[in-house]
Image: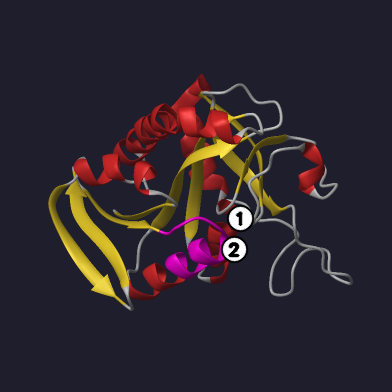
Amino acid sequence: MFVAYIGAMDVEVDAIIKSLKDVKKEEYRGFSFYVGKRGDNTIVVSTSGIGKVNAAVTATVLLDKYHVDYVINAGIAGSVDTLIGTICVADILKYHDVYCPGYEGLPRGPKDFRPSAQILSQAKTILKDKVLFGTFLSGDQFIEKVEDLHNASLNGVVAVDMESAAIAQVCYLFSTDFLIIRTISDNLSNKEATENENEASKNSFNAVVNFIDNYKF
């Protein structure tokens, strides 16, 4: 299979690049992509940079050049009350900083974004009880207090980040399946996020390669 992997920061992508064989660096529209093999899979990897626009543009350029079977976005995330170190998989993705009167969700989009039932079912089978499935909220702000979430409903929310919903929206527009895997690095604390980003990124990497190696399309 042909898989795309996008991480916001180098710490979220370095391990996956190192796990590939025959890696080639390719440039396209000013973006760098690393393409290599892992078992029977070809994987293209890119670092998007932090935030929704960086994530969306990277995903758009990647999907314009590479016709992948699915996209994985992985790395770290914060949470209101999910235990630090928990590996989370998004079954619903929403923005917490978007309000568009007259629309249930966004123009040209649904009220929320969801991976396919097939990819979620396989994630539950492959990753089993080692991960927590739930809603992810995304927005262009590092969240340090609940009030920063703009009164978004926290029902079912397991993780908060700055990129995943934007990547999900681009995948929706490109009719490409996706999976979001993030490890909780902090409970609304920049200090915790900095202290835990390496270990949290490692946890996400381990879940990602387990999924890629065992996913049956």
| Residue 164 vertical placement versus 136 (above, below) | below
Residue ID at (28%, 44%): 14
Q: Amino acid at mark 1?
A: Ala
Element under disc 2? helix
Q: Residues within 10 Å of mark 1 (few under 14, many from 20)?
A: many
Residue ID at (53%, 59%): 167
Check if residue 135 falls in the magenta segment: no
Q: Which mark is residue 169?
A: 2
| Residue 200 vertical placement versus 40 (above, below) | above
Outermost residue, bottom direction?
Answer: 29
Q: What is the magenta range?
A: 48-59
Circle 1/circle 2 CB separation < 8 Å: yes
Tell me where residue 79 appears, x and y as whole percent: 65, 33
| Residue 207 vertical placement versus 2 (above, below) | above
Which secondary structure class fits the magenta region best?
helix
| Cα–Cα gap, marks 1 and 2 | 6 Å
Check if residue 57 falls in the magenta segment: yes
| Residue 148 vertical placement versus 64 (above, below) | above
Q: Which mark is residue 213?
A: none
Tell me where residue 215 appears, x and y as whole percent: 36, 41
Tell me where residue 34 appears, x and y as whole percent: 24, 58
Answer yes or no: is residue 184 visible.
no
Q: Residues within 10 Å of mark 2 (few under 14, many from 20)?
A: many
Answer yes or no: is residue 78 visible.
yes
Is residue 187 or residue 107 the one in the foreground?
Answer: 187
Which residue in the protein does label 1 denote?
165
Q: Amino acid at mark 2?
A: Gln
